[in-house]
């Protein structure tokens, strides 16, 4: 049920484009987005009262104010998508806990004790992701205040995913230069470890 809900929620990012291609106006595009996400969230959370009510309310708003609803939807998803991993990174830096990147590296390499240089590097990398994700959260309001009109929407339209992909590849290259004589895991393998660890938390 939750897997189906997740797929439906992810499909909500494509459905508006299909509606638009079919000739639907802004209102129908926004409604398609809201309905798909509402159904997906209901299946994921199992809350069959709250999400239908919220979805119906948002459908009416989407018909009357399609652009603000789509922008608000993108902003909420952007913030939630950053706050959830940011919370994990920050909590892992608490006294007595293992930095998240260190834990991922240890899990990826069989669960043994990390070398001192790798432990230091992964601890610094955890701090880097905390700062980076926090700056990404600040980016839309900063662009809204000082950027060109509409520039605050740029990070919400997928550009951040491209930046993250570039950073992951660049970090892999830096890691190979900094840490020698070690069997380095490529970025896609670390992403798999992250997904495995995240699914184990649920």
Image (tube, rainbow, N blue to C red):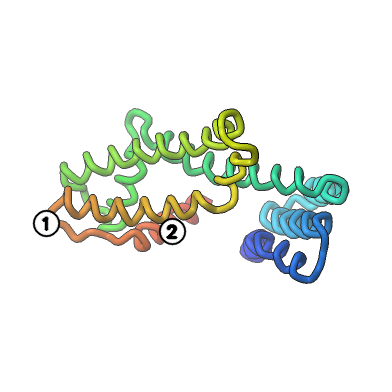
Residue 91: percent from left, percent from top: 43, 34
Q: Is residue 116 above or below residue 180?
A: above
Q: Quadrant of the N terminus?
A: bottom right
Residue 172 spot, x, y in % from top left: 28, 55
Percent across and percent down for residue 187 are 34, 59
Q: Quadrant of residue 89?
A: top left
Tell me the element at label 1.
Answer: loop
- The residues tagged by marks 1 and 2 sit, at their Cα atoms, a distance apart of 26 Å
For image coordinates 45% across by 39% down, the residue present is 133
Give me the residue at 76% from left, 54% from top.
34
> Tag 2's secondary structure?
helix
Is residue 71 or residue 115 the one in the foreground? 71
**Sequence-first tag of 1 and 2:** 1
Residue 28 in the figure: left or right of residue 188 = right
Q: For mark 2, what is the residue?
A: 196
Residue 153 seen by the camera: yes
Q: Which residue is mark 1?
A: 181
Q: Can residue 49 be seen in the rendering of this structure?
A: no
Who is closer to the viewer here, 142 or 96?
142
Residue 52, given in percent of the width and then of the height, sits at 82, 51
Identify which residue is drawn at 49% across, 56% down: 199
Q: Using residue 30 as the reference point, say whether residue 139 is left or right of it.
A: left
Could you classify mark 1 by the number of other residues whose Cα lies within 10 Å: few (under 14), some (14-19), or many (20 or more)? few
Q: Pick out the residue farthest to the bottom.
A: 22
Residue farthest to the front, as pictured: 148
Pair 1/2: label in front: 1
Please tell me in which quadrant of the rendered image residue 22 appears: bottom right
């Amino acid at each position: 049920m939750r897997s189906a809900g997740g797929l439906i929620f992810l499909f909500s990012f494509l459905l508006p484009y299909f509606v638009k291609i079919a000739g639907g106006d802004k209102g129908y595009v926004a409604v398609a987005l809201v309905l798909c996400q509402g159904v997906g969230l209901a299946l994921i959370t199992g809350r069959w009262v709250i999400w239908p009510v919220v979805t119906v309310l948002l459908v009416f708003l989407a018909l009357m104010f399609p652009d603000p609803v789509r922008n608000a939807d993108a902003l909420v998803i952007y913030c939630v998508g950053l706050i959830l991993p940011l919370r994990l990174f920050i909590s892992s830096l608490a006294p007595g806990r293992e930095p998240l990147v260190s834990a991922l590296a240890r899990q990826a390499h069989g669960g043994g004790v990390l070398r001192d240089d790798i432990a230091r590097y992964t601890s610094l990398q955890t701090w880097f992701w905390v700062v980076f994700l926090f700056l990404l959260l600040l980016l839309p309001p900063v662009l809204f205040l000082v950027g060109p009109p509409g520039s605050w929407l740029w990070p919400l339209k997928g550009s951040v995913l491209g930046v993250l992909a570039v950073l992951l590849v660049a970090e892999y290259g830096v890691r190979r230069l900094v840490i020698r004589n070690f069997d380095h895991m490529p970025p896609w393998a670390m992403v798999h470890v992250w997904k495995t660890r995240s699914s184990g938390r649920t």
